[in-house]
Amino acid sequence: MADALGEGVQARLLAAQVLAVQRVLARTNWQKVADGRTAHDVHPEAVADADQAFDRLR
């Protein structure tokens, strides 16, 4: 992923941030489903969380 984002440490740092955000979002969604909610019910929150997270990366 870092190669697609550019060169050097800045690209590697950005790639790490993207991966960390994906991991946190996935874990959050997994926990909601594990707590008994359906993926369908979680979806609107997941989209809002992802939008907010990736807006912050910009």
Image: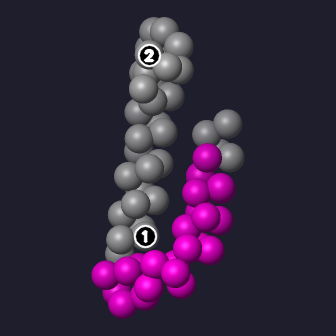
Q: Is residue 58 above or below residue 36?
A: above
The quarter of the displayed image where residue 24 is located: bottom left
The dot on residue 38 is none
- Tell me where residue 36 appears, x and y as whole percent: 36, 90
Which type of secondary structure does the marked residue at label 2 adopt?
A: helix
Say if the magenta span includes residue 9.
Answer: no
> Which of these two is toward me, 38 or 32?
38
The quarter of the displayed image where residue 26 is located: bottom left
Name, please, the residue furthest toward the bottom: 36
Query: Which sits earlier in the primary sequence, circle 2 or circle 1?
Result: 2
Q: What kind of secondary structure does the magenta stretch mostly adopt? A: helix
The stretch of residues the image draws in magenta is 32-54
Going by the image, does 18 lie left or right of 30? right
- Tell me where residue 57 appears, x and y as whole percent: 61, 40
Residue at the disc numbered 1? 29
Name, please, the residue furthest toward the left: 34
- Tell me where residue 27 appears, x and y as whole percent: 36, 63
Q: Is residue 58 above or below residue 3?
A: below
Quick one: quadrant of the C terminus?
top right
Name which residue lies at 45% across and 9% down. Answer: 8
For the residues bearing labels 2 and 1, Cβ distance under 8 angstroms = no
Name which residue lies at 35% across and 75% down. Answer: 31
Residue at the disc numbered 2? 3
Say if the magenta span includes residue 45.
Answer: yes
